[in-house]
Amino acid sequence: MKPRKLYRAARISGWTAIILGFGLLGFVASIAVSAGQITYEGTLPTSSRSAGPNEMVISAVTTISNPGIYSLQGFRVNLHLLTSNGTLVAYGSSNTTVLGARSTSQVPIEVLADLSSPAAGLLITTNATLVVQAWVNATYAGLFPVALQLHEDYPWGAPFVQPQYAFGVATQEANGSVSLPISMSYQNWFPVPEYGTFDLGVLSVNGSNCGGGKISTPFPVAQGQAFSGSTDLTLRSGCDFHGGKLQVHYSGLLLSLELPSVVVP
Amino acid sequence: MRVSDQAAGSTAAQLKEHPWRAILGAALLLVLFGVIPTAIVLYKSTQGLSLGFNPWVIFSLGALVSVLTILVWVSRPTSAYGPLKIVSSISKIGIVLLLGAIFSVSYTFTSGNATVTATVGSGPIFVLLLAAPLVGLLSGGLFTVLDHRFPEFRRGQERARQ
């Protein structure tokens, strides 16, 4: 190679290295500034539905705003709900989302709670402070892997707080069956209004089915509202229900679950 | 090191006349690559930022980059320019690879009632950052070959440019 060409190539590559170096540093700085503008907000729950017996799916929404100039790829939220002593009561995740530059997106998350587990079962009738743990994974500007870990106390409002049952005096019906008046009451602290039907079943001391009845909520019971209703349970004649168990199954718009059983006096 | 041209209005001559230029240049580079990044990291560490390594590593690496850059600049009129540029580029490649291996920034902050920890790890950006020192390495190699094969050519060219 002629010296002039060699000299020119050396100079051009030297200047290219300098321009590239400062350009890349500027690029990294712009990524840092742009990423600092991202905001993230979670709302839990927005609704819920029954996924099966004693399973509840709580829907949440994460609103993420990316006003920066680079896109956020592979955005995925994993969420755990734990009791204060660390027992897992619900879990879920979002789909993987791509969030473009200068855009805002609502990412839905579905959280499944298995209410048949002892820890989660308490949440049917007891308000509690739960711990939300969320993990967010994403790649910013296609170059920086980002992981977010969120830890937040979440006040859980139970759907059937302080369920109380009052039994009346059993009377013999003309057809031979026994009528047992019962009234029930509770408060709904669940954030989503709920209405449905309680199936009440009475088991004798030795476990045989004595009969039962239904109580329906004629209107959606909103958060903070109390409900009370009554019915006459129709029981088999000769079935010894005193000291037996009252089993309560609720089936409603959003929830389908077993409430804790109580002893029939 | 063979100094072939020190009295041709070149960098070395300027240095003899104005040695404070090198000192000022070194100080500016040290501020740019060492002091400012370290100050930002130390300030942010009081607000929840934590690195996967000691923040003073940044200052040390910044100081190393500054010294190498000044050495390359000072050696420009000599035949050591190309080899020093190679050494400087290889050092910068090493620094980028080292930072790529140990880089992990976590930042803890509160948002409403939530405590949020954001962690940024090393990724493809560090491969991209290798581009500049790699091109610098090429430049150093070309200057080394040029000075070896045509010892006086570059000095003549740079004298003519001034």
Image (tube, rainbow, N blue to C red):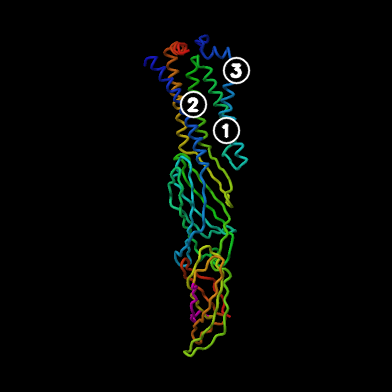
Apparent side of residue A24 relative to residue A224 in the rendered image (left or right) = left
Residue B105 point in image, percent of width and height = 55, 40
Residues rendered magenta in the picture: A206-218
Chain of the residue on which disc 1 is drawn: B
Query: Quadrant of the image for the N terminus of chain A?
Result: top left
- Find numbered disc 1 in the image and state the secondary structure of the residue it sits on: helix
- Residue indicated by mark 3: B20
At label 1, the amino acid type is Pro
Real-space Cα separation, disc 3 to disc 1, in angstroms: 24 Å
- Residue indicated by mark 2: B90
The single residue placed furthest to the bottom in the displayed view is A174
Query: Quadrant of the image for the C terminus of chain A?
Result: bottom right
The single residue placed furthest to the top in the displayed view is B7
At label 3, the amino acid type is Trp
Our reading of the magenta stretch's main secondary structure is: strand
Residue A219 point in image, percent of width and height = 49, 71
Q: Share a chain, discs 3 and 1?
A: yes
- Residue indicated by mark 1: B37
2 or 3: mark nearer the eye: 3
